[in-house]
Image (cartoon, grey):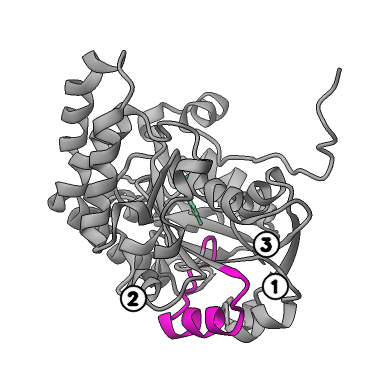
Amino acid sequence: MNTRDLSAHTAYRAGRGVEEVAREVGLDRSELLELGSNENPHGPSPAAIDAIQAAAANVHAYPKAVHADLTAAIADRWELSPAQVWPGPGADGALDYLARAVLAEGERVLVPEPGFAYYEMSARYHGGGVDRYGLDREQEFAQSPDRVRAAHDGHRIVYVTSPHSPTGSEMSLSEIADLAASLPETLVIADEAYGEFTDRPSARSLLDDHDNIAVVRTFSKVYGLAGLRVGYAMVPESWADAYDRINTPFAVNRLACRAGLAALEDEEHLERTVSSARWGREYIREHLNARTWPSGGNFVLAAVGDATAVAEAAQRVGVIVRDCTSFGLPDCIRISTGTREGTLTAVERLNEVV
Ligand SMILES: *Cc1c(COP(=O)(O)O)cnc(C)c1O
């Protein structure tokens, strides 16, 4: 037999890993700066490492209590009821749960272009069709409500990303509220994977007055736990009993639950990560010899001509950046911020090749 027809599904292509690139360009792993995937250059919180080690001996048991503890800790932090917090294997997993809860076969979703590839993939897995709303570089890639509404035609889900990857643009709370209020039968998913890096408040506050907004967050970026796969959605109060009907049991594994709980308490690690990212994005904008855009995230988009050629040349001088061709921006690269020292070195090396 064969799989069902998957020809409309695009395959996910991750940014390239450091081991792979080191081998290919013949550099030592330690000489390479991995700035292609918006990972945390400071590594995970040390408290999370301890928690993982301590939990290792118990991985024979399902994560019953600890899964509830993580949900409760997140709920507490955001002043929500635990039923409004839907943990998943990465924010990607949480996006799947939202699609699973909302989409009926054949309904359509609206995704930003350029934008995060997984929105589309997730919607398709769940039987949805996909349309796009375009972001205009001459308008700094703004995700304005009017732009979304111009493309909207009965879509069940609209995805917005703030801060947006790969561009760094942001959407204000009033814009998200305006969009949701004008589309009462559409779920507006506000993806805040980079929410900790901006000064703007979370769309969490909008959940109190709207029953068609969900907010997505992750432990992969600021908390440095990308390798564990843990994220969550925050949903309207009226959805309270849906999670138990749609989640894959024990969505977040035991080690990830423990690490997440520890990371939530480690304010020093969070502070260090956020401050080096905020400093780094300004430094890149000031010193890289390329057109760049303002960023609310831990990365900067830069126009460099032939992005594929520049990304390859960058690798040869020891810097991995994201070629944005797959995002529909063949002249742009996305550079994650590093540690302060890493960012300084990266800009110096990149200026040799842009
Ligand atoms: C990294 C990222 C995510 C989620 O990543 P997970 O590792 O699955 O938590 C979601 N949205 C955007 C825009 C991202 O860049």
Q: What is the three-letter code of the residue carrying label 3?
A: Leu
Answer with mark 1 or mark 2, whichever residue precedes in sequence.
1
Q: Whole-Å distance between the Cαs marked 1 and 3? A: 12 Å
Q: Is residue 236 visible?
A: no
User: Cβ–Cβ below 8 Å for labels 1 and 3?
Assistant: no
141 displayed left or right of 31: right
Q: Which is nearer the eye, 197 or 24?
A: 197
For the point 61% across and 61% down, the residue is: 115
In reply to whether residue 185 is colored magenta, the answer given is: yes
Residue marked by disc 1: 134
Q: Is residue 255 magenta?
A: no
Query: What's the residue at 58%, 82% (across, down)?
Result: 144
Helix, strand or loop at label 3? It is loop
**Does dot 1 land on a helix, a strand or a loop?**
strand
Which is more foreground, mark 1 or mark 3? 1
x then y, percent, for residue 284: 40, 65
Circle 3 residue = 329
Residue 262 in sight from this viewpoint: yes
The residue lying at 56 percent from left, 46 percent from top is 96
SS at mark 2 in the image: loop
Residue where numbered disc 2 is placed:
200
Left or right: 255, with 326 as reference point: left
- Residue 164: give x, y in percent of width and height: 50, 66
Q: Which residues are magenta?
A: 165-187
Of 16 and 209, nearer the camera is 209
Residue 224: where, in percent of width, then height? 31, 43
Residue at left 30%, top 65%?
278
